[in-house]
Amino acid sequence: MCILIYKPAGVAFTDINTLEKCWDANPDGAGFAVLKNKIHVVKGLMNFDEFLKAYSALYDKNNDIIIHFRLASKGPVVKELTHPFVIDKTQPPSLEFITNKPILFHNGTIPNLGKDGKSDTLEFAELLAKISENTWDKVISTVRRTDKFIIAKQGEVKLYGDFEIIDQVYFSNLSWQFNRGINTIKFLEVLYKRKR
């Protein structure tokens, strides 16, 4: 299912317990971006300790930070398919880089994308790169259904979909609050009660 977390500038988010629960529920890799003058991306983090070390090194309460914990639905479990992806025709060769190009995070599964060793989100980032930026909202709304997206660029973070807010931090879903293997009916009951 994956989990997206958006920590706005000025909001503290150092809850290691929550981060570890998110990892445990989505253990197929992680990546994050810190938005300063440019966007600092770190991805390809394949264990929690590696993630926590990188996150701690770059954490700054005064900057927007977006985190993605992956639960692979399309594409193999490899460092290169952790999020985010640059919205460009090609991806940077490094798993840590600084960019001024828009980046894409996604929680969900996009039908008909994710072939030939790519994930659906990587293919979607490549497709967005081929069209005008002022059409991205319309394109995302056609594939969004229950999916969640975040597009970040210098000075702007845009969330698509309904995010849950806990202590001013945005989560794409709350599946991480439940143990793996939880009874699906129990999960849906809790989710239904929250929406009421």
Image (cartoon, rainbow, N blue to C red):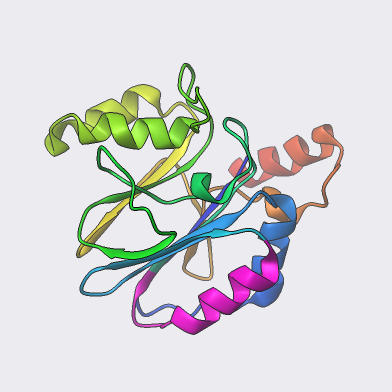
Lateral position of residue 48 relative to residue 170, left or right: right
- Image quadrant holding the C terminus, namely top right
Q: Please give the name of the residue rendered at 41% of the width and 37% of the height, measured from the top-left corner.
A: 122
Q: Residue furthest front?
A: 93
| Residue 146 x %, y % | 50, 31
Q: Please give the name of the residue rendered at 47% of the width and 16% of the height, measured from the top-left corner.
A: 112
| Residue 30 x %, y % | 57, 57
Q: Please give the name of the residue rendered at 64% of the width and 46% of the height, measured from the top-left corner.
A: 194
In the image, residue 115 above or below residue 173? above
Lateral position of residue 144 relative to residue 103, left or right: right
Q: Residue furthest top?
A: 112
The verdict on residue 61 being magenta is yes
Lateral position of residue 64 relative to residue 51, left or right: left
| Residue 78 x %, y % | 59, 46
Q: Please give the name of the residue rendered at 72% of the width and 51% of the height, measured from the top-left corner.
A: 25
Magenta highlight: main SS? helix
Q: Nearer the viewer, residue 114 or 139?
A: 114
Is residue 196 visible to us here?
Answer: no
Label tally: 0
In the image, residue 110 above or below residue 101? above
| Residue 186: quadrant of the picture | top right
| Residue 66: quadrant of the picture | bottom left
Q: Which residues are magenta?
A: 47-64
| Residue 47 x %, y % | 68, 63
The verdict on residue 51 being magenta is yes
